[in-house]
Amino acid sequence: MKKMKRVGMIMVGVVVVAGALWLCFGEKIKILYTSLNSFKDENLAHTFQHTPEIQPTKKISKGGEPFHFLKEDNTELAEGFYFKDTFYPSEKFMEDTKTSAMLVVKNDEIRYEQYFFGGDENTLFSSNSMGKSFVSALMGIAVSEEDVESIEDPIGKYIPEFAGTELENIPIRTCLQMASGIHFNEDTDMSNFSMRTLMGTSAMKVIAKYGMQEAPYTYRRYLSINTEILGQVIKNATGCGLAEYMEEKLWKKIGADHDAYWTLSNGTELAMGGLSVSLRDYARFARLYLNEGSYQGQQILTKSWVKDSMDVSAEYSKPGANQDAYNAIGYGYQWWVPDGNQSEFMAIGVYGQWIYVNPSKQIIIVKTSADPDFMAEGYELKHVEFFRAIADGIS
């Protein structure tokens, strides 16, 4: 009887503790469960077209008068492309990479637009890490308006959590270029980082504990926490959340046709990649860079910021830097710059999200996907050749 009573007391204790945990973390546990379920392979296409319905987000309102691309019937895409002596038919490649939508714009005219998995021109597609390029644009605006004095400033100047830590004197520029030297592994440390921030710990407090792996400007390592740092610098320097700042300084000024949404983590915008944007609005954002930061005669980004964003002349920024397969494509200020002479640049997100811009041909290509095989060898370089074939085939 005593044993049964003890067991009963333990069970009551467990229920009380579980209840207390649920009261404290129930909503966050529910979000975590939803997130994990959303990223199952079979759910990716739906998730990437319905993120604002699945996750907490903040709205980014469009402006008054949208910019309209001209539209003509879909042109025939290039038959295919070669990669490492193998020919890949375009339609088969799109199918194999689980393409959910693709848009091709040349000289402000839509030459091809196709949606799959139930989407259409009003669907908002998840940016994943394409959102990093938007954060770069917001940093450029904050610098031009002198809220951020210089990207040579140390991050500790704007983020008090870094005061007295190894990270205090890292220049902002190194975070833009993914060359901060912070001791963090994107593959093994991200889950722990995400869990701790979801459960309520400030992202900057978590990052402050990581320390340094090497001196800044030594090596390019793709670390999404660099973009989280950039986001926090913008927030602290401007006094605005990222969604609010983007709405005022960018979204209402570039002719966006739809509201966008920014995913929240622990109540704050996920700078590393949390936007949901329509396909044509991704193209409108790319068009701003194609036009050297200008929209309808108004300079939204300075020409120098756009130019510097694509500068991959530093050894760690160049394509193939450090003979690292992850660095096969060059990296500027949160933009990818492939090897070549056409001044191309790209925003890339996991699971196959792409903005490709070719200024020499006045081409913008947006391709969204739900591809669980996005880590396959040569995946990114193969897409570059695919986009080049499309650009070459459109007169």
Image: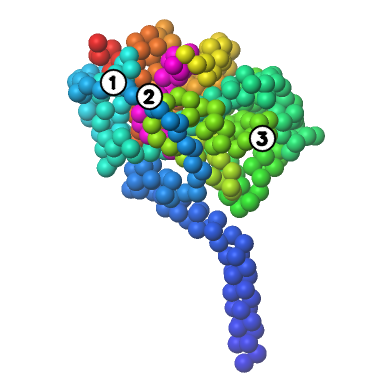
At x 54%, y 59%, the residue is 27
Residue lying at the far right in this picture: please name it. Answer: 164
Q: Nearer the viewer, residue 11 or 149?
A: 149
Residue 314, percent across and down? 58, 12
Q: Earlier in the sequence, mark 2 or mark 3?
A: 2
In the image, residue 151 above or below residue 114:
above
Q: Earlier in the sequence, mark 3 or mark 1?
A: 1
The residue type indicated by label 1 comes to Leu
At x 62%, y 19%, the residue is 144
Residue lying at the far bottom in this picture: please name it. Answer: 1
Q: Which residues are magenta?
A: 276-296
Q: Residues within 10 Å of mark 1 (few under 14, many from 20)?
A: few
The residue type indicated by label 2 comes to Phe
For the residues bearing labels 2 and 3, Cβ distance under 8 angstroms: no
Residue 74, percent across and down? 21, 24
Residue 250, percent across and down? 51, 27
Residue mark closest to the camera, 2 vs 3: 2
The residue type indicated by label 3 comes to Gly
Residue picked out by circle 2? 67
Q: Nearer the viewer, residue 313 or 311?
A: 311
Measure how far apart labels 2 and 1 are at the Cα level.
10 Å
